[in-house]
Image: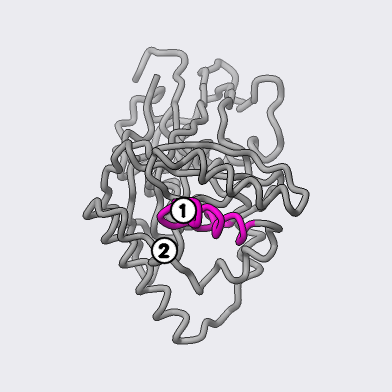
Amino acid sequence: MSSAPSITVRVPGSTSNCGAGFDTLGLALTVYNRVTLVRSAAAAIAGVNGGDRRAQSMVAAAAGRFFEAARRPAFGFTYQISGDVPPARGLGSSVTVLAGVLAGLNALAGAGLTPHMLTSLVTDLEGHPDNASAGILGGFCVSRCDPATGAYLGTLRFPVPADIAFVVVSPPVEIATKESRGALPPVLPYLDAVRSINSATYLTAAFASGDFARLRGAVSDFMHEPYRLPRIPGGSAAIAAGVAAGGYAGWLSGSGSSVLCVAPVGVAPGVGEAMQREFDRVGVAAELRLLSADNEGLRLE
């Protein structure tokens, strides 16, 4: 067992779906949260300065799942979460907490769980592997689950070059993923499914080949964005404005409220300004982040 009484884990935020890659595609971004765990003599789990209720619930769920999977005696700890990944904005904040706790406990307990195992545990907790794989493994991730059980099976990941920027604009609106799924229809028209498959596979090929210019006009979704984007005033217009300003393509990040454009790094500031203007037009003060891909993933500090 590790003798280290504390550990800090840095976990990148991420964008998921990437258009039509629903619950499958994820991409780690250079925005981070840090989770610090300090092992304690008491059996309880406690947040430094209390912590909010949502974080407490996630930390407790991750700890319970870890001790069950690792088959190690449970122990108490205090935790502190800090960083720049905003909660409930479609940037994988819940994964930063879950993965941070799991990786931290793995280090403190000396359990030796692999990144594949950690990704599987986070997938179990999240219900889908897109943000989980990106936050833990880094890069552009294409993940696979068992079609019958939903169990995580694996990820193919691709590094993304530093000259590709990800322009993220986040309105001050929190959207919980579970709640946003309630806006989705129980049945999709056949043609919408076909068109979405075409877009998702082409986007994946563009990222895998590194030919990002091929994304122009090629990223569209008919599975979730038509039902989610209208709930975000200025969202659709911001994506369109970003593309018109030189971005390759754009999409709703996760379930929102953030929207994102992929662009050559040289035009990224102009793309961001164009996107922000569309939110300004509807009276929404949205926050701009000019990011790149994180190809490292989760890291112990």
Q: Residue 20: horizontal and vertical position, in percent?
A: 44, 66
- Report the magenta residues as a range: 235-255
Instruction: Depth check: give the residue in front, 199 or 93.
Output: 199
Instruction: Depth check: give the residue in front, 90 or 251.
Output: 251
Q: Bin the neighbour count of mark 2 within 10 Å (Cα to Cα): few under 14, some 14-19, many 20 and up.
A: many
Q: Residue at x 55, y 68 (%)?
A: 224
Q: Which residue is mark 1?
A: 16
Q: What's under tag 1, amino acid-wise?
A: Ser
Image position of 252 (left or right of 134): right
Relative to 279, say whether 84 is above or below. Answer: above
**Labelled pair 1, 2 in contact (Cβ < 8 Å):** yes
Image position of 87 (left or right of 149): right
Q: What's under tag 2, amino acid-wise?
A: Gly
Question: Which quadrant is home to the C terminus?
Answer: top left
Q: Secondary structure at mark 1?
A: strand
Q: Which residue is mark 2?
A: 21
